[in-house]
Image (cartoon, grey):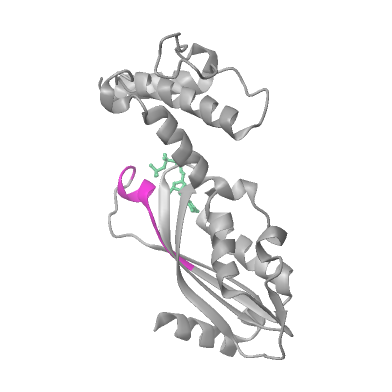
């Protein structure tokens, strides 16, 4: 199928969801529900509905979803998508619960180069990179792994990099009310590499500086130079 026909098919798909091919009995997904909207929100129902959508996508791109290599692909892809978006099921309080400690320390804490994998909300294509976080404690510190867990929670959603950066900074502010927080993300957007403008080496760097990190240039500078090394 040429790409023009494919784009035409996909634009019809976005205008008329009811034009999707229906899944017939005897498919490799025969025990699962059809593309009708979920009536319950159980994990199994959600996976089945997403898998059905992937089955339709395979047909629309010109594949044969019944061939052996693709038999389990709709369900695998559904499970992968649910993993990539698992952050919607999480919240700050559950993540930090039990890992906020009262300590009389006031020097900067930094956890840098936390791997991050997300999906850009414009194309649902991955962007990935590293997150560095610093904060100035105000009688409370947070378990170090919880910083990485907050990165996971917000990155495992459909995102733009700027919002991801700010959400992580705000979450730390909310959790431990430090004197300041700095977050820097350095990422590669596959929507700019594999498609569109196709710039293999482009990097996007975003930062969010709150409290003393925003107001005091020396604090900001200390943070930026420590995460460089
Ligand atoms: N600011 C920002 N933009 C992003 C991010 N991820 C993807 N984008 C951009 O979202 C924009 C969407 O622009 P559109 O013109 O609607 O989409 P498009 O035609 O696919 O754009 P091209 O990628 O230029 O082909 C593109 O410029 C992407 O580079 C992000 O995290 N932050």
Q: Is residue 3 above or below residue 220?
A: above
Q: Which residue: 67% across, 90% down?
A: 106
Q: Quadrant of residue 211?
A: bottom right
* Residue that extends furthest to the front in the rendered view of this protein: 31
The C terminus - image quarter: bottom left
- Reply yes or no: does residue 188 show up in magenta: yes
Q: Nearer the viewer, residue 68 or 57?
A: 68
Q: Nearer the viewer, residue 20 or 5?
A: 20
Q: Quadrant of residue 194?
A: top left
Image x and y of residue 32, in percent: 51, 19
Image x and y of residue 139, in percent: 74, 85
Question: How many numbered dots are placed on residues in this image?
Answer: 0
Tell me which segment is drawn in magenta. 185-196
The N terminus - image quarter: top left
Q: Which residue: 66% across, 31% down?
A: 41
Can residue 7 be seen here? yes
Q: Is residue 124 above or below residue 62?
A: below
Image x and y of residue 146, in percent: 60, 68
């Amino acid at each position: 199928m040429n790409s023009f026909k494919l784009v035409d098919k996909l634009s019809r798909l976005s205008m008329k969801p009811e034009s999707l091919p229906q899944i017939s009995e005897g498919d490799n997904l025969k025990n699962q529900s059809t593309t009708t909207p979920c009536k319950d929100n159980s994990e199994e129902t959600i996976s089945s509905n997403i898998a059905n959508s992937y089955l339709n996508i395979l047909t629309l791109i010109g594949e044969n979803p019944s061939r052996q290599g693709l038999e389990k692909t709709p369900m695998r892809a559904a499970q992968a998508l649910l993993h990539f978006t698992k952050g919607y099921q999480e919240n700050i309080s559950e993540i930090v619960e039990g890992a906020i400690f009262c300590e009389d320390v006031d020097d900067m804490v930094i956890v840098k180069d936390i791997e991050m994998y997300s999906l850009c909300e414009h194309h649902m294509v991955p962007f990935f990179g590293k997150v560095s976080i610093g904060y100035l404690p105000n009688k409370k510190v947070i378990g170090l792994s919880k910083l990485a867990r907050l990165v996971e929670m917000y990155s495992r959603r459909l995102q733009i990099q700027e919002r991801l950066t700010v959400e992580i900074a705000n979450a730390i502010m909310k959790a431990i009310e430090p004197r300041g927080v700095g977050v820097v993300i350095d990422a590669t957007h596959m929507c700019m590499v594999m498609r569109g403008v196709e710039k293999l080496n482009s990097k996007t760097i975003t930062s969010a500086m709150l409290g003393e990190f925003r107001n005091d240039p020396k604090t900001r500078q200390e943070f930026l130079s420590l995460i460089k090394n």
